[in-house]
């Protein structure tokens, strides 16, 4: 492609709307332009990168035995009502009525649609197993779309769905997808980890997220230094070794703590440490208040609470909601006598004689104990894991790092097939529900994550497999016919051997061409300029590390083939 003919509007300045590196660079490098909040038009350069990801994904899905189809983006509400998700999914599901007043939604995912197809078309165990996938636009009405393609409302996704006769078959399908995903992200040239994850609104009882490691990642993940364990914060299990203390129960005391509301201030005032105090945190779960007890130096993990009580929605209560539910101002709330359901973290259950709020302004209570002074509905792992905790798999040392979710795979079980009466006849003639799995890759998000992981102060540094062009040839000859002819010949020769090349034939200053080449992140830059006429050489520079070689024009094609093969080697 000739730069002079390509719609590639680069920007010198960063648009004010861009918050993270990938968003800034994708706008500056002419990848995309914003249409409305969280919705972008992909320009040719950006779409070319997305197509690179799609090609890798498609090859690996086909290699794993999946079959490609295409499902509608508009889905009837009745399908979603069969699974109960039309009401439960929340405001991210964009609902609307057509001219006949029929309710529909824009698909954020396609479990209902694919299950409807399979229940109509497959009826026998002989039809199974099967895995069907698509690469298609999705829409989720995010409340705060941000970070460009990292958290947009409209995005490109690969979603696959497996159907098996039993759990053993579903386990095999899950394993195939797990390995396929590892190959996809390895081929994309990304540093990633597969982490245990919560299944969220998709459902199911087991899932993994594939996280690209990046300093600006949206999610914090927990990894073990001593084994392969990795999980996101929502899923990371805290293995408690604390046994109930055999300390004698002391008498309950009420202590005046004037104006002392925060944990550290209360602890200083009372001469205790945060691990001797218990916080009473109020959440609104499906519209109802619940209290969670955690140690003073710990934080509640809301997803764990949500899963424990089976709530569709959980959020921390605002001060007014806390007062309305308990009659107590925040900072002095405690579990003794409050009229709400109480759940305790397992660590709290092992504590004795701890300090809590006294449910009265300016007062706390000491020597409080579960069982004697109040009861809890359940005890469970309800807190966020920390680096002080042992690895739940091997007992080793944990560390926290940042990651960007680019893929998620789920064991769905029979939840969808049972609710939608998607049944097949087994070998004994008995009707059974399909056992399902679900597997998603955020195709457009992979490009953003790759840029978050691969950039420098000058712009993008594309991994070769994802680069829209593998080589850019800079013609710095101006009106020098010999230089122009050499650049044109190189451009033609590189195309003939199958190398994707961008010829910068614009009437621009050399400095502008160099800056744009760095900004675009094309893996190799070939500069045809005065060194050719003076010394008979052409400069070949690798974008990733700046490694530069000066060689004769006749050697350029062979050298680039060699360098590209090195970069693409498994």
Image: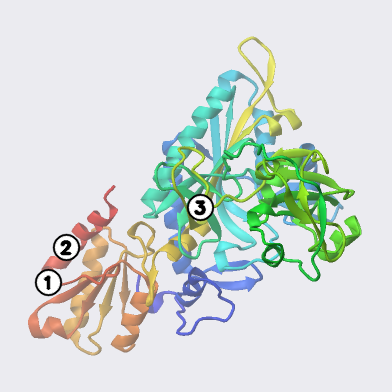
Q: Earlier in the sequence, mark 3 or mark 1?
A: 3
Front: mark 3 or 1: 3
Residue 95 to residue 199: above or below:
below
User: Left or right: 69 with respect to 449?
Assistant: right
Q: Which residue is mark 1?
A: 551
Residue 459 quadrant = bottom left
User: Left or right: 118 with respect to 452?
Assistant: right
Crowd rating for badge 3 (residues with CA inside 10 Å; few <14, some 14–19, many 20+): few
Give how far across and how far down residue 525 sits, in percent: 27, 72
Determine the secondary structure under disc 1: strand
How many labels were placed on the picture? 3
Q: Which residue is mark 3?
A: 387
Residue 530 quadrant = bottom left
Q: State how far apart marks 3 and 1 are (Cα).
A: 52 Å
Give how far across and how far down residue 215 sits, in percent: 46, 64
Q: Which residue is mark 2?
A: 559
Q: Earlier in the sequence, mark 2 or mark 1?
A: 1
Determine the secondary structure under disc 2: helix
Residue closest to the eye, 160 or 150: 150
Asked if marks 2 and 1 touch (Cβ < 8 Å), the reply is yes
């Amino acid at each position: 492609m000739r730069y002079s003919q390509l719609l590639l509007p680069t920007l010198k300045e960063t648009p004010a709307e861009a918050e993270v590196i990938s968003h800034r660079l994708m706008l500056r490098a002419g990848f995309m332009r914003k249409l409305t909040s969280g919705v972008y038009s992909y320009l040719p350069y950006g779409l070319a990168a997305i197509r690179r990801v799609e090609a890798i994904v498609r090859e690996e899905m086909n290699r794993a035995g999946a079959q490609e189809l295409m499902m509608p983006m508009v889905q009837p509400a009745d399908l979603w009502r069969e699974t109960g998700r039309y009401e439960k999914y929340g405001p991210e599901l964009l609902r609307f009525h057509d001219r006949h007043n029929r309710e529909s939604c824009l698909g954020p995912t396609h479990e209902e649609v694919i299950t409807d197809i399979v229940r109509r078309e497959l009826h026998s165990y002989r039809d199974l197993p099967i895995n069907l996938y698509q690469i298609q636009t999705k829409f989720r009405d995010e409340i705060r779309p941000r970070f460009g393609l990292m958290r947009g409302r409209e995005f490109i996704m690969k979603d696959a769905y497996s159907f098996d006769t039993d759990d053993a078959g579903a386990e095999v399908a899950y394993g195939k997808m797990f390995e396929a995903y590892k190959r996809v992200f390895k081929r994309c040239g990304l540093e990633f980890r597969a982490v245990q994850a919560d299944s969220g609104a998709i459902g199911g009882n087991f899932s993994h997220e594939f996280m690209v490691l990046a300093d600006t990642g949206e999610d914090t993940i927990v990894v073990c230094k001593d084994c392969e364990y990795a999980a996101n914060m929502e899923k990371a299990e805290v293995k408690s070794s604390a046994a109930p203390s055999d300390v004698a129960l002391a008498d309950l005391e009420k202590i005046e703590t004037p104006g002392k509301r925060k944990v550290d201030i209360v602890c200083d005032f009372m001469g205790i440490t945060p691990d001797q105090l218990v916080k009473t945190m109020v959440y609104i779960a499906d519209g109802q208040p619940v209290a969670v007890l955690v140690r003073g130096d710990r934080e509640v993990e809301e997803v764990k609470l949500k899963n424990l009580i089976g709530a569709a929605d959980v959020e921390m209560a605002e001060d007014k909601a806390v007062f309305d539910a308990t009659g107590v101002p925040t900072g002095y709330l405690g579990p003794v006598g409050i009229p709400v359901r109480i759940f305790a973290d397992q660590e709290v259950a092992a504590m004795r004689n701890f300090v809590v709020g006294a449910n009265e302004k300016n007062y706390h209570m000491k020597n409080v104990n579960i069982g004697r002074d109040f009861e809890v509905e359940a005890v469970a792992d309800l807190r966020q894991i920390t680096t002080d905790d042992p690895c739940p798999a091997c007992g080793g040392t944990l560390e926290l790092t940042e990651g960007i979710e680019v893929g998620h795979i789920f064991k769905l079980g029979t939840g969808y097939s049972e609710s939608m009466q998607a049944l097949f006849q087994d070998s004994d003639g008995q009707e059974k529900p399909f056992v399902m799995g679900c597997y998603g890759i955020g195709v457009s998000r992979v490009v953003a994550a790759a840029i978050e992981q691969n950039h420098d102060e000058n712009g993008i540094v594309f991994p070769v497999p994802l680069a829209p062009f593998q080589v850019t040839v800079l013609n710095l000859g101006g009106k020098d016919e010999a230089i122009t002819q050499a650049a044109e010949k190189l451009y033609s020769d590189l195309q003939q051997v199958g190398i994707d090349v961008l010829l910068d034939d614009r009437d621009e200053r050399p400095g502008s061409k160099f800056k744009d080449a760095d900004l675009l992140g094309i893996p190799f830059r070939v500069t045809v300029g005065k060194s050719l006429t003076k010394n008979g050489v052409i400069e070949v520079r690798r974008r990733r590390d700046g490694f530069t070689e000066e060689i004769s024009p006749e050697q350029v094609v062979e050298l680039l083939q060699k360098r590209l093969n090195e970069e693409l080697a498994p």
